[in-house]
Image (spheres, coloured by chain):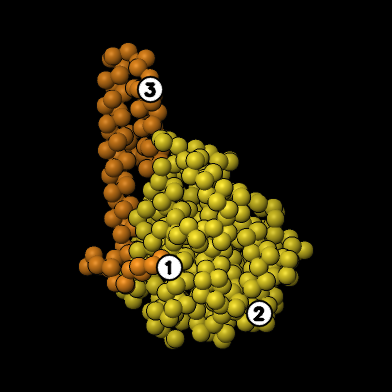
Amino acid sequence: MVTALFGHRDCLGHVTPEGHPERVARLAAVADALAGMDCLDRREAPLAERVDLLRCHPESYLAEIRAAIPAKGIRALDADTHVMSGSWAAALRATGALCAAVDAVVGGETSNAFCAVRPPGHHAERDTPMGFCLFGSVAIGAKRALDHHGLARVAVVDFDVHHGNGTQDLLWNEARALFVSSHQMPLWPGTGQRHERGAADNVLNLPFPPGTGSARFRQAYDAQVFPALEDFAPELVLISAGFDAHAADPLAQLNLVEDDFAWVTARLCEIAAGSAAGRVVSALEGGYDLAALGASVAAHVEVLTEWGERQ
Amino acid sequence: MNETPVEEMSFEAAMAELERVVSQLENGDVPLDQSIALYERGDALKKRCEEALKAAEARVEQITTDANGAATGTVPLDG
């Protein structure tokens, strides 16, 4: 089967302040990187439904974010996270993309999917926007797979260079979800130590020191992540695909290259083929060097299409 | 006033300066001769923003449409 690609022009409408790394041009770079891939099943992301958002965020939080959006200009919610008139629609499209991708993949329309969206989501906690993120899109997608589609086990793998503190917060008590995050430490947001294991031993954190590089990254995934995933036997694998662990990224120093993203994607697809009928849903998180972001997304989606065709 | 040529400005930079210009003009305390220059600067910034956004939109349309401009997948109805 083919790989679905979800996106929406509304994701351009979230404008950040001058000099902010999470900027409009990121999505244009991603779009360019995927433009030549004729085999993709290209779809518009719908707006997320309230029922999906409420699985991870309380009503009061949705109201708070909505009320924080200024009539004009850009408002800082903290030092990193901003909202303006286009932010609500962009964040709803980003989360809606995850929900629609889960529906398409679990429903058997496509074997896997990539969501080319912004703002990212993996830092948004239950009651707190942070790290450029408003809604925990990937966690919301995981909850939809569990609660709406009735899957028994869903894995979320987050290889963004920053700890997925939001996804960890949202899935902490969810025994049906295994959350794995690899990230640089020390680095913002400072969480993601090994002893953070989740309420049901359902969280696995792999902190890496600056300068880790390809070999040690791969060894750690081989030794810890893949065996844990195989034991868990997920029925769906979600990926928080941040590409800021790339050597060229300005925000971190893990020093990975495109081929590392292709490698980890292939191994995750292989595990999904074993227990999840190949079902993989991936979503863009970070990645702030435009050239590295484009090349990394292309490598990642290329592997998704290769594995999609095998199903 | 920042006199960086508008055609060299990023989308975000042009937006930020446009907002500063608009709020200066809205405040009404700018002398007439300066307000004309400000208006011209604002007009150029607005054009720059529109062009940059249009270009980005054209590129991002590629996510949801194929080379012929058509969506290749079915649009889910129930989200």
The picture quadrant where one finds residue A180 is bottom right
Q: Are marks 3 and 2 in contact (CB under 8 Å)?
A: no
Colour-to-chain, orange = B
Residue A193 on image: x %, y %: 73, 60
Task: Name the chain under label 3.
Answer: B
**Foreground residue among A234 and A157:** A234
Q: CA distance from mark 3 to mark 2?
A: 59 Å
Q: Is residue A122 above or below residue B29?
A: below
State which mark lies toward you, 3 or 2.
Answer: 2
Q: Which disc number belongs to residue A54? A: none
Relative horizontal placement of residue A156, taking residue A92 as reference (left or right): right
Looking at the image, can residue A29 be seen?
A: no
Q: CA distance from mark 1 to mark 3?
A: 44 Å
The residue beneath circle 1 is A100
Q: Is residue A236 above or below residue A294?
A: below
Looking at the image, can residue A190 be seen?
A: yes
Residue B54 on image: x %, y %: 28, 49
Kind of residue indicated by mark 1: Ala
The residue beneath circle 2 is A232
Colour-to-chain, yellow = A
The furthest residue to the top: B31
Pointer 1 local density, CA inside 10 Å: few below 14, some 14–19, many at least 20: many
Question: Tag count in the figure?
Answer: 3
Kind of residue indicated by mark 3: Gln
**Foreground residue among A139 and B40:** A139
Residue A236 on image: x %, y %: 54, 77
Q: Give the residue drawn at x 49%, y 50%.
A: A22
Pointer 2 local density, CA inside 10 Å: few below 14, some 14–19, many at least 20: some
Q: Give the residue drawn at x 27%, y 20%.
A: B36
Which structural element holds mark 2? Answer: helix
Kind of residue indicated by mark 2: Phe
